């Protein structure tokens, strides 16, 4: 399809919400009161919130209309039937289990599937997925793709979400009991990069004869399908539903946070082929989420998702989304930041370690950059560095560094226009100009798991003043 030049939002705005403009002093106070942790800053003190693309979408007029017709019956609600039909059509999987969000799907599915000591292998397990695997007493192995290895024939620059097939084969031949292989599409923790159908087909070829389940974390299935049509010559002419279906056809089951490509503010699902596994999941669902025809959601949420799952596959919407990410990456690069290329759809990832080379990993350079963006212009982004993926040293030494010090500028769906992103790029340029003067942070308080959500930090230097 032709890119509308210059790309523009393929929708008009019917309902608006004012955004806050805190002063420099208010930003300084908010951040200090939040223990220098952006998760603890109230949203009313944020001008442009790029913390996450999860649950932050703007719903369409069609979705809001559908909300009103939600059937709130406890059992056998009509809203479930519509949702089930759409998910069956999309995935080809007969067993459809709604849940309230992605991590509920993970907790139920992995808690049912995995036994203590077993292994789950993935391109990358998202952090909540890894937590569910660990809660089942099982262990995660992440095998992000490596283009230099034989067997990985695709250009990994284009399909950076692919799993390392040679590594997978080695693990499968090893002594450990691999129960499932998960492909996260797109690979959020690895930069929002897509997985190719060819890579998934190889995974299936390796797993099927060994009786190992292939699962998709399909939270961004439509964005993955779109990127496949743009990057794999074999799929250029395919429709988004056809690519998505081809991927689902190669899997035994899937789970998803529908707070992303469900285009709604809450929701998740498990879809399976195996009726016995689905029955066991449903029994667990009843314990922790709700009756199988609502699974922790209201009927109105199911209605919004049923429409959202259709809308998200509109090629013009997906093209706009990919083009905005790529354009925004250009702006951030012009502002002075190294960005991860090629861009995916849901976020732009900036390399904080390269820009803040004077701040060592244990002093949290990604946190320093994220906090500076907040102080400069109340822009909130996600820190994906040592605070998130590193950890405390058991011997009490400096923090174990994360493999990368990324900051993620996530793009909520249908929420911000290009003007908002231009503002963010402008703030980023102000921060880039003062990057060498920024200082790091140390951790005062932290939880044992997922510490980034609640940690309390202290700055290691004086704050740098910004223009406005
Ligand atoms: N899987 C992936 C790939 C995700 O990106 C997320 C959430 C989840 C599972 C968990 O879903 O939040 O509905 O329980 N990602 C959000 C983010 C939080 O900001 O990337 P959830």
Image: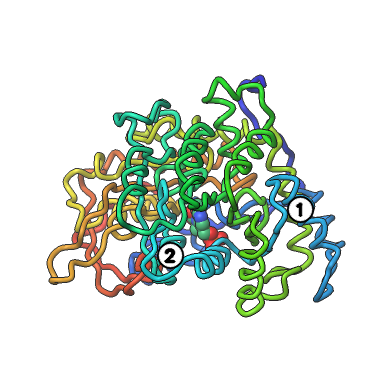
Q: Residue at x 69, y 29 (%)?
A: 239
Say which of marks 1 and 2 sits in front.
Answer: 2
* Left or right of residue 248: residue 183: left
Q: Compared to 198, does 408 lie above or below?
A: below
Marker disc for residue 306: 1
**Residue 240 shown left or right of residue 364 in the figure:** right
Q: Is residue 459 above or below residue 124?
A: below
* Quarter of the image with the N terminus in it: top right
Residue 89 rendering spot, x and y as whole percentages = 75, 46
Which residue is label 2 attached to?
Answer: 133
Query: Can residue 51 be seen?
Result: no
**Left or right placement of residue 300 versus residue 407 in this view:** right
Q: Which tag, 1 or 2, sits closer to the chain's start?
A: 2
Residue 370 coordinates in the image, percent (x, y): 36, 52
Q: What kind of element bears circle 2? A: helix
In space, the residues marked 1 and 2 are separated at their CA atoms by: 29 Å
Percent position of residue 38, x then y: 40, 62
Question: Where residue 310 sits: x, y (%)?
Answer: 74, 44
Q: Nearer the viewer, residue 368 or 405?
A: 405
Q: Are marks 1 and 2 in contact (CB under 8 Å)?
A: no
Residue lying at the far bottom of the rendered structure? 287
Residue located at (66% from left, 51% from top): 262
Label 2: how many Cα within 10 Å (few below 14, some 14–19, many 20+): many
């Amino acid at each position: 399809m032709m890119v509308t030049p210059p790309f523009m939002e393929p929708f008009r705005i019917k309902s608006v919400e004012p955004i806050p403009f805190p002063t420099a002093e208010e930003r300084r106070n908010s951040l200090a009161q939040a223990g220098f942790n952006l998760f603890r800053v109230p949203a009313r003190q944020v001008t442009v919130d790029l913390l996450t693309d999860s649950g932050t979408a703007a719903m369409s007029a069609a979705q809001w209309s559908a909300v009103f017709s939600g059937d709130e019956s406890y059992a056998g609600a009509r809203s479930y039937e519509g949702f089930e039909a759409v998910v069956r059509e999309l995935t080809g999987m007969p067993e459809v289990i709604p849940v309230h969000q992605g991590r509920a799907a993970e907790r139920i599915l992995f808690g049912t599937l995995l036994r203590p000591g077993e292994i789950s292998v993935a391109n990358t397990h998202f952090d909540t997925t890894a937590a569910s695997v660990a809660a089942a007493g099982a262990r995660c192995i992440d095998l992000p793709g490596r283009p230099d290895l034989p067997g990985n024939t695709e250009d990994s620059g284009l399909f950076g979400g692919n799993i390392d097939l040679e590594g997978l084969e080695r693990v499968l031949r090893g002594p450990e009991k691999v129960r499932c292989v998960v492909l996260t599409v797109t690979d959020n923790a690895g930069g929002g990069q897509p997985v190719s159908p060819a890579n998934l087909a190889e995974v299936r070829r390796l797993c099927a004869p060994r009786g190992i389940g292939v699962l998709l974390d399909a939270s961004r299935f439509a964005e993955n399908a779109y990127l496949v049509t743009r990057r794999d010559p074999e799929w250029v002419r395919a429709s988004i539903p056809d690519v998505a279906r081809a991927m689902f056809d190669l899997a035994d089951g899937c789970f998803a946070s529908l707070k992303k490509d469900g285009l709604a503010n809450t929701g998740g699902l498990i879809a399976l082929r195996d009726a016995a596994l689905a029955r066991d999941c449903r029994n667990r669902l009843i314990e922790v989420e709700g009756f199988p025809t609502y699974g922790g959601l209201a009927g109105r949420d199911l209605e919004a998702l049923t429409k959202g799952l259709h809308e998200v596959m509109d090629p013009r919407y997906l093209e706009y989304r990919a083009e905005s990410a790529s354009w925004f990456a250009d702006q951030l690069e012009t502002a002075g930041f190294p960005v991860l290329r090629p861009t995916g759809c849901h976020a732009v990832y900036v390399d904080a370690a390269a820009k803040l080379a004077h701040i060592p990993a244990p002093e949290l350079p990604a946190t320093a950059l994220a906090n500076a963006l907040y102080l400069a212009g109340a822009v909130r982004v996600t820190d994906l560095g040592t605070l998130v993926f590193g950890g405390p040293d058991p011997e009490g030494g400096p923090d174990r560094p994360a493999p990368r010090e990324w900051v993620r500028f996530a793009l909520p769906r249908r929420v911000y226009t290009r003007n908002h992103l231009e503002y963010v790029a402008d703030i980023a340029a102000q921060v880039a100009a003062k990057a060498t003067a920024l200082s790091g942070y140390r951790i005062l308080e932290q939880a044992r798991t997922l510490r980034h959500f609640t940690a309390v930090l202290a700055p290691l230097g004086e704050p740098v003043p910004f223009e406005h």
